Image (tube, rainbow, N blue to C red):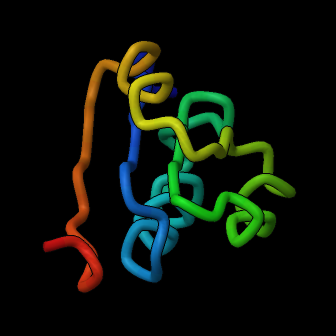
Amino acid sequence: MNKKKIAILGGGNIGKAIAFGLLKSGNWNPSDIFVTKRKPEQLNDLKDKGIKTGSNNEDAIRVSDIILVLKGDSIR
């Protein structure tokens, strides 16, 4: 297992696909992945797998070694 923690800022379709891919690879524990989205209730499928979810990017960054920032269409 990978010992690094990763934050995915932007849990839309691509962010969720990356998170599920990391899990499927077998190299990441669910507890080592943190996905954020403005409406974190839309991340319940990730949460059900043990992935940390939330809306606070600062919290995710603070506990992570790797940060992925995914720009959505609504961000200008």
| Residue placed furthest toward the left | 76
Q: Residue at x 39, y 61 (%)?
A: 10
Residue 42 x/y as whole percent: 70, 72
| Residue placed furthest toward the right | 48
Residue 3 x/y as whole percent: 44, 16
Q: Is residue 19 left or right of residue 50?
A: left
Q: Is residue 10 left or right of residue 74?
A: right
| Residue 45 quadrant | bottom right
Give above or below for 4 relative to 30.
Answer: above
Q: Residue at x 27, y 29 (%)?
A: 66
Q: Residue at x 25, y 63 (%)?
A: 70
Q: Residue at x 51, y 50 (%)?
A: 36
Q: How many marks?
A: 0
Residue 50 x/y as whole percent: 79, 44
Residue 46 x/y as whole percent: 71, 60
Give above or below for 66 relative to 22.
Answer: above
Q: Which one is nearer the viewer's eye here, 50 or 11? A: 11
Give above or below for 69 relative to 57.
Answer: below
Quadrant of the drawing holding the C terminus: bottom left
Q: Which one is nearer the viewer's eye here, 17 or 61? A: 61
| Residue placed furthest toward the front | 76
| Residue 58 quadrant | top left
